Amino acid sequence: MNPQPPDLLAEKFPDLHKALYSLPKNVLKRSGRFLYSAFSTLTHGKYYLIGINPGGDLTKPPYSSQTLLSDIQKLGAKTDNAYLDENDWSTPRYQEGVKALCKYLDYETRDLCASNLIFIRGKVKEKTIPVLAQSFGYKTLYEATKKIFWPVHDQVMKIVKPECIFAIGTEDAYETMRELMGLPQTVGKRNYSGPLYYATSGEYNGRLVNLIGLPHFSHNSPDLELISKCME
């Protein structure tokens, strides 16, 4: 009988392991995904990228059979990066946007820890943020993230210790992160109104961190000049 492979998630990050497996059963059994990056990105890094929720057509494989629980169970062996190694995205422009952002930052895309506020894919009727949140019994993205997924993000940030977090998608993603991290609404000239570019900074988990909100890369290529201003 072959021995079971070691559970690297439990061995290296017991608190993150506990937070993930403490997610509600009705959440774990839905189609979902935790990391878009490799397990190796769960280490001290400069950046953390956060989207809203995973994409993918729930009627087609592998998404039709990929539950969040099965994704978490394979996490310790995960070596791929969704932005570099997958070619089945319906909107590859998003992948190109992430790669362009990393090139601008002079940061390897494979080293970027990346996830979503909510780890569950939305059904066709759940494509809008309020409807997706309501499927968990909450009215807003903020409430759903705070009540269900935030303990996981808190553990990830304790591991990665990012200097800068990019919240991609909508103003809701940025505001949800800002409120849950307890960051000020504006810092000097760091509040930008250009197509969904926002920025603030403050202390979280005893460390100074910048939070930058960017538009969804499927619809807008990253404006590197605005990003530069947000990071000043």
Image (cartoon, rainbow, N blue to C red):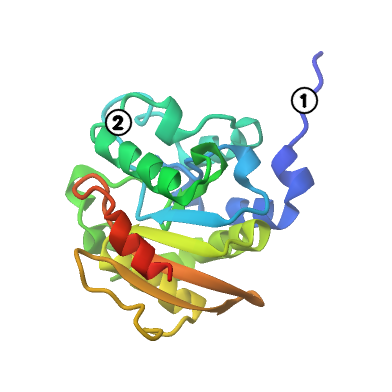
Q: Is residue 54 visible?
A: yes
The residue labelled by disc 2 is: 89
* Quarter of the rendering occupied by the C terminus: bottom left
Kindly indicate whether the residue at mark 1 contacts the one at mark 2 (C-beta within 8 angstroms).
no
The kind of residue tagged 1 is Gln
Q: Residue at x 27, y 55 (%)?
A: 223
Which of the pair 157/106 is nearer the observer? 106
Task: Estimate the x, y position of residue 156 in percent, counting from the top left.
Answer: 60, 57
Which of the pair 188/82 is nearer the observer? 188
Q: Secondary structure at mark 2?
A: loop
The residue labelled by disc 1 is: 4
Q: Residue at x 62, y 39 (%)?
A: 39
Q: Given this view, does label 2 or label 1 mark the residue nearer the observer?
A: 2
Q: Is residue 78 above or below residue 226?
A: above
The kind of residue tagged 2 is Trp
Q: Residue at x 23, y 44 (%)?
A: 218
Q: Is residue 94 above or below residue 17?
A: above
Name which quarter of the figure residue 15 lies in.
bottom right
Q: Residues within 10 Å of mark 1 (few under 14, many from 20)?
A: few
Task: Estimate the x, y position of residue 105 in percent, counting from the top left.
Answer: 46, 51
Task: Estimate the x, y position of residue 173 in percent, counting from the top left.
Answer: 34, 64
